[in-house]
Image (cartoon, rainbow, N blue to C red):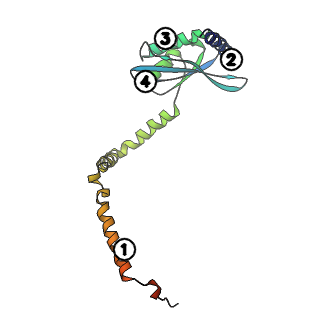
Amino acid sequence: MRYMRHVAAKVGARIAVDMNGQFGLMFDGWTSGTTLFVAIYGVFTKDGILSQVLLSISPAEYGQSAEAYLEMFDAVLELYNKDSAMIMFIVADNCATNQAIAPRLGVPLIGCASHRFNLAVCRYLEDYKSLIDQVQTLCIQLRYPQHHSGARLPHALQAAEIQRHSVVVDLPDVGSLRVDL
């Protein structure tokens, strides 16, 4: 464990140097059971190359409010000898909490593209809500065997089998058939 702390200190010092004076923060949260975890990445360029380094993954011990996130950012940035005045932008999804964080930091929020796309699709589909609800109702009904044509499949197969046998009985000697062209 002693060596792990030493490596972590060296890696942290290197990240602090690489991040220099201006950077962005990219973050997202997820729950596991009843615990909310937040991952925070530093986004910066070094020698003209974009870098995204993991700064922290930790439980959100103080809640999910904008204030709690800002306190978490300050605590993480302190590990790298940085402060929130150095943040140039944040990248996160478009929830109300994140929208409240950006103005408090005085930086733009770059919303997650997939989240923005999802919001746009939902807005577009609002005009088709009744049709989508009808399709959803039908799909739910079709989950149960007694409601879809698959329940009648054995009977349909029996009819096809009978029809196939009648063709075979009617044509016992295929060789006797002759086609004149």
**In front here: 112 or 75?**
75
**In front here: 146 or 92?**
146
Q: Nearer the viewer, mark 2 or mark 1?
A: 1
**Callout 4 touching callout 3 (CB < 8 Å):** no
Q: CA distance from mark 1 to mark 3?
A: 77 Å
Residue 18: assigned label: 2
**Secondary structure beneath label 2:** helix
Relative to 23, is 118 above or below? below
**Secondary structure beneath label 1:** helix
Residue 129: assigned label: none
**Callout 1 touching callout 3 (CB < 8 Å):** no
User: Sequence-wise, which precedes: disc 4 or disc 3?
Assistant: 4
User: Few, some or many C-alpha atoms within 10 Å of disc 1 (few <14, some 14-19, many ≥20)?
Assistant: few
**Secondary structure beneath label 3:** helix
* Residue at the spot of label 1: 164
Q: From this viewpoint, is residue 140 visible? A: yes
Q: Could you tell me the amino acid type at mark 4?
A: Thr
* Residue at the spot of label 3: 71
Which image quadrant for residue 120? top left
> In the image, 170: left or right of 80?
left
> In the image, 86: left or right of 159?
right
Q: CA distance from mark 2 to mark 3?
A: 23 Å
* Residue at the spot of label 4: 31
Q: Could you tell me the amino acid type at mark 2?
A: Asp
Q: Residue furthest toward the right?
A: 47
Residue 35 screen position, x and y as percent = 41, 19
Residue 154 screen position, x and y as percent = 31, 61
> In the image, 102: left or right of 165?
right
User: Few, some or many C-alpha atoms within 10 Å of disc 4 (few <14, some 14-19, many ≥20)?
Assistant: few
Q: Could you tell me the amino acid type at mark 3?
A: Glu
User: Sequence-wise, which precedes: disc 2 or disc 1?
Assistant: 2
